Image: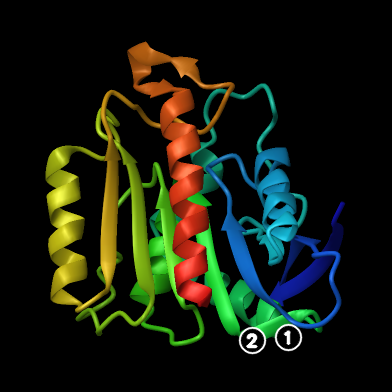
Amino acid sequence: MGIFLDYRDADSVCEAYVALPTSPGLHPAVLVAHQWSGQSDHERETADRMAALGYVGVAIDVYGKGNRGAPDAADHSALMNPWAGNRAALKQRLMAAVDFAKRHDAVDASGIAIMGYCFGGLCALDVARSSTTDVKGAVSIHGIFPPPNLGPQADISSKVLILHGWEDPMATPADVEMVAKELTDAKADWQLHAYGHAMHAFTNPHAASPSTGMNYDANADHRSWAATVAFLEEVFG
């Protein structure tokens, strides 16, 4: 069970959920970026799972404290679009979360990674695209790939793992080729796992809308978790 802690991006207050391992001392940290509805039980449970693996799990907050989508709402575009449309502001907000994790007294600041789902997958990629050396690895899980277009892309030092449902209509094969070229040109150490027949939101047991391209896939869910765990072991050595 974790605790909620506030952190700031300039004058904006954000609320992280932080789950700690049971062992004492300093630990690597894994930031968990949320999907389009905002921080939810799913991201907090992932932070708990990270703590069980021996990492400090930090479910971050892009939208700001108290800004969450209604659980029964079908569309959270009003929350996501301002950030997806202002990638400079998104980068600043994400780096505020990285700085928060670095300062936590249970975190080994030399070992930080970020993972994210859907919109959070874009967030994870944008942290890597920032060319920060503070984040060792970034995992995008059924994420979206548009580049931030904030000027020439500097070399990427974070290792990158993309976990992708091949039938995801929000990230087409052309989009996959585009992000692969982008990461290659930025000299990133990247890998991509594509899951056949899997759609968008394949890790979400509540996703059940194949007609709109959003559907849970147990195989892809389990395989992507195993890939994430193995990637973090590699990143943190």
Report x, y in % for residue 12. 70, 70
Q: Mark 1 — residue?
A: 103
Residue drawn at x 63%, y 82% as measured from the top left: 99
Query: How many callouts does the rendering have?
Result: 2
Residue drawn at x 35%, y 65% as measured from the top left: 160
Is residue 134 visible to us here?
yes
Q: Secondary structure at mark 2?
A: strand
Is residue 11 visible to us here?
no
Report x, y in % for residue 67. 70, 48
Nearer to us in this view, 35 or 223:
223
Numbered label attached to residue 109: 2
Q: Residue 191, relative to residue 237: is it above or below?
A: above
Disc 1 versus disc 2: distance between alpha carbons?
7 Å
Disc with the residue nearer the chain's start (1 vs 2): 1
Residue drawn at x 81%, y 68% as measured from the top left: 6
Numbered label attached to residue 120: none
Q: Do callouts 1 and 2 mark residues in contact (Cβ within 8 Å)?
A: yes
| Amino acid at the residue labelled 2 | Ala
Residue drawn at x 75%, y 73% as measured from the top left: 7
Report x, y in % for residue 8. 72, 75
In the image: residue 215, left or right of residue 27:
left
Nearer to us in this view, 23 or 176:
23
Instruction: Please identify the quarter of the rendering in which residue 88 is found.
Output: bottom left
Report x, y in % for residue 205. 57, 24
Instruction: Please identify the quarter of the rendering in which residue 20 is found.
Output: bottom right
Nearer to us in this view, 146 or 222:
222
Q: Secondary structure at mark 1?
A: helix
Label 2: few (<14), some (14–19) or many (≥20) C-alpha neighbours in 10 Å: some
| Amino acid at the residue labelled 1 | Arg
